[in-house]
Image: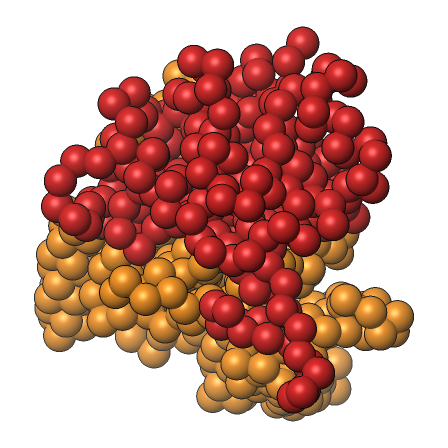
Amino acid sequence: MTKYGMAINKTRCIGCQTCAYACKMQNSVAKNVRWNRVLSEGCDVVDGAVGQYPNLSRTYLPLACQHCENPACMKVCPTGATYKDEMGRVEIDYEKCIGCRMCMAACPYNARSFNWEEPVHEPGFAYGDKDVPERTKGVAEKCTMCKERTDRGEEPRCVQCCPMGARVFGDLDDPNSEVSKVIATRHASQLLEEQGTHPQVYYFE
Amino acid sequence: MNLIMKNKVLSAVCAVLAVVGIVCWVMQLSQGLSLTGMSTANSWGLYIAMFMFFVGLSAGGLIVASSASVFHIKRFKAVALPAIVLSTVCICLAGMFVLIDLGGIQRIWRLFTGPNFASPLVWDICVITLYLVINILYLVNMRRGNDRVVTIISRFALPCAILVHSVTAWIFGLQMAKEGWYSAIMAPIFVASAMDSGLALLLCVLAVLKKARIFNTSGDLMASLAGLLCTCIAVDAFFIFCEVLTMAYPGAAGAETLALMTAGPTAPFFWFEIIGGLVIPFCVLVFAKNRERTGLVVGASVLVIAGVLCKRLWLLLTSFIVPNVQGAPGIMSDGSWTLMGSYAPTLPEVAIVLGVVSVGVLGFELLAGWALAPATEAASVKAKAPAAAADMEDAAPSLG
């Protein structure tokens, strides 16, 4: 079995947002939506800082769908539009989504976005991978772990584009894969472990 | 008896509001849910709160009507018909709110071709459909006077009514991601608040019907229903106290959510529910003398209904305020990135809600006109006899 996963080196992340924009371009993500967000930890603003001057610190947390082994969103989806595929990714069948947003209430990571209106693309030309399906208003969407790319044997776009090489992608079921080794040797942890969702996205420092 | 023509002004106002609501809904269908105040951070709003509210309001009727047969409370039988009409209308409105909230209603057939039975939403759809069918069967058979069939149906109606509220509670109570929802007491609280808001609405409607000389309920029965309401308020308050104490005591994550509830943006709703929706009505209704005064009973009932509406709002919205991962929703607005979400219903959203409620009032007039019309002449004689007997029994000690 293949179980795709990712490990993100928080020490290497410089908060440049390249992954967030690369993701938008790859997946034709509309205006006002981000599948991939680089958060400044402990801050309500982008690029904020924690502490009191002059003792300030700033750390970044790149956040997208965690592709959980026990996905809360999949369990509550009334039509089975959200599913776990054979590669261990959590995916959405937009044709089945009725827009009830139960998944958005269930996801502990707020990873999902909703198309509140017909997607607007800015700049006004069709960007995105030719294989990525277009979404319409009224469906939920989120990181697919670049399903279309990874199906072709390529890395997700955020992994490929990170200038710091902070992201490692691979098969968690293969103990010899780079991602499995990194998780084993670098004491990688999962986000909100207490929620029991068992994310397949790991963070290490 | 045509109630729509009898209350021309009310009906006309409701018809106008209903049309405005429908126009807004069509706009929402063409534009998308961006017409509402909801956002990725606050992904459920007024519609879902109203859904919870109307599922609850529907309870009073069916529970009063069916307990007449199940627990042999003969006196309640006298108001069974208006009670069931009310229950039927309210559950239809609740269903309408869910449908209005859907972003892709044109794909709703997917629910029937590929339902995921692990989803509480699917349980809810099944149970609400069953509940509606039971209501209609109950209504039809009661109007025909099939007492035996009514007795059998009420055996199923009571557990089904309890289940409807529990399943609605589980939509929220099973979501571990939301600290304010994830609680085993959610289902009992929903049943209790459904009982008190539903009973309160029934009392208000009975008082209006009596005032309009459409359906007469004896003062004694009103007082006894008010007594039941008082008990339900106490049970609801007890459950809420259990919940709040459990959240507060460890001083951990629950206490943070509690602090939001009692002092955050949703605090006015919380305090109104506790004081206006529980404490004041209880203090009014706990005295037998007050329960005999229709004005006080109706006043307390209105407070209870308003309190439960506030409860639905704080329960739903408080859990969206602080995400588990700070800034996680990454809200985008007009190209700039703001990490905090906020929610306030928009005008069209409110118009749609008012429209649905207006449809409900019209629906009640229509259905009650049909259900009560011949019954008031033919069955009132039948209904009066036991009611009068009960009156005598109750009146005797106080007279003596």
Query: Can you tell which quarter of the image residue A168 is in?
Result: top right
Residue at 54 percent of width and 18 percent of height: A85
Q: Of residues B185 and B296, which is closer to you in this image?
A: B185
Report which colour depicts chain A.
Answer: red
Residue A191 horizontal/vertical position (percent): 70, 48
The answer to whether B247 appears left or right of B179 in the picture is: right
**Residue B203 at least partly seen:** no
Please report the residue visible at 17 percent of the width from the left and 35 percent of the height from the top: A126
In the picture as drawn, the residue positioned furthest to the right comes out as B250
- Whether residue B272 appears in this view of the structure is yes
For the point 47% across and 33% down, which residue is it?
A160
- Which quadrant is the N terminus of chain A positioned in? top right
* Residue at the extreme top of the image, as rendered: A1
Residue A30 position in % (x across, y down) = 27, 46
The shade of chain B is: orange
- Report the residue at 19% width, 50% height from top: A122
How far across and how far down the image is residue A11, in percent?
A: 67, 53
